Amino acid sequence: MRRSLMVLLAAALLGLGGCGYNTFQTADEQVKAGWAEVLNQYQRRADLVPNLVSTVKAEAKFEQDTLTKVIEARAKATSIQATPELINDPAAFEKFQQAQGQLTGALSRLMVVAENYPNLKANQAFRDLATQLEGTENRITVARNRYIKAVQEYNVAVRSFPANLTAMVFGYKEKPSFTVENEKEISRPPTVSFDTAPARPASAASGVGQ
């Protein structure tokens, strides 16, 4: 009897492997790892913002509306609890994505406006923070692309026959990814270009990024 049970157990395990169960386990872990790295880079950016804001505030004439939008966007982005379960909730994922996109846009606008303030551009602390921000935005793009690839592979497995039958049995569902529309935004990280050219008139900068 014991031998028969062992044979049945071995057959069941082999069946699980053949129907894609192991594939789901691996793909799911890759998605989780990719998501963890995305969150890590977003947190890195959020941590840079307070120091960046404090440095910009030293420029008394800096556009307060631009600065306020950065502060509000960061507050909104960090108010969302980015748990591992977020990638299993399309609605929550979309809300998180929109909040991060708004922060990206606000920071990009701040970098554009900063070009009009020679004293700020000459501030070494600001230059260092801006360079760190640009590097972080690039790392965010890389991390997001890796996550997108991991989700694509996972979702293909969920939809493919006969693995989709295993997915239904064990509750594996498609996971949300970053939308195509938002990719245009993340592909343009804030550009740091501090040169010695005269500052552009405020009227010229007002049309940038509209």
Image (tube, rainbow, N blue to C red):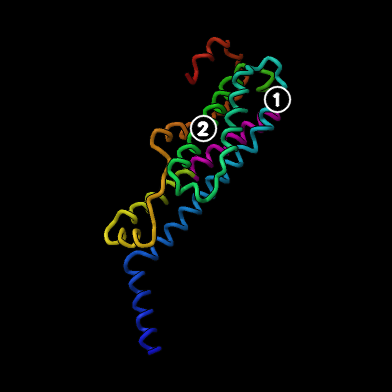
Looking at the picture, does residue 47 appear above or below residue 201? Answer: below
Residue 135 lies within the magenta run: yes
Q: Residues within 10 Å of mark 2 (few under 14, many from 20)?
A: many
Q: Tell me what residue is drawn at x 65 percent, y 17 percent.
A: 62
Main secondary-structure element of the magenta-colored stretch: helix
Seen at 52% across and 45% down, the residue is 38
Residue 151, x across and y down, in percent:
41, 50
Instruction: Give the residue at mark 2.
Output: 189
Q: Earlier in the sequence, mark 2 or mark 1?
A: 1
Q: Which residue does the numbered mark 1 point to in the structure image?
A: 123
Q: Position of residue 8 (x, y in %)?
A: 35, 81
Q: Find the magenta span and give its range.
A: 124-143
Res 70 → quadrant: top right
Could you tell me which quadrant the N terminus lies in? bottom left
Q: Which image quadrant for residue 117?
A: top right
Q: Nearer the viewer, residue 171 or 124?
A: 171
Residue in the image at 35% along x and 74% along y: 14
Q: Nearer the viewer, residue 13 or 48?
A: 13
67 vs 145, nearest the viewer: 67
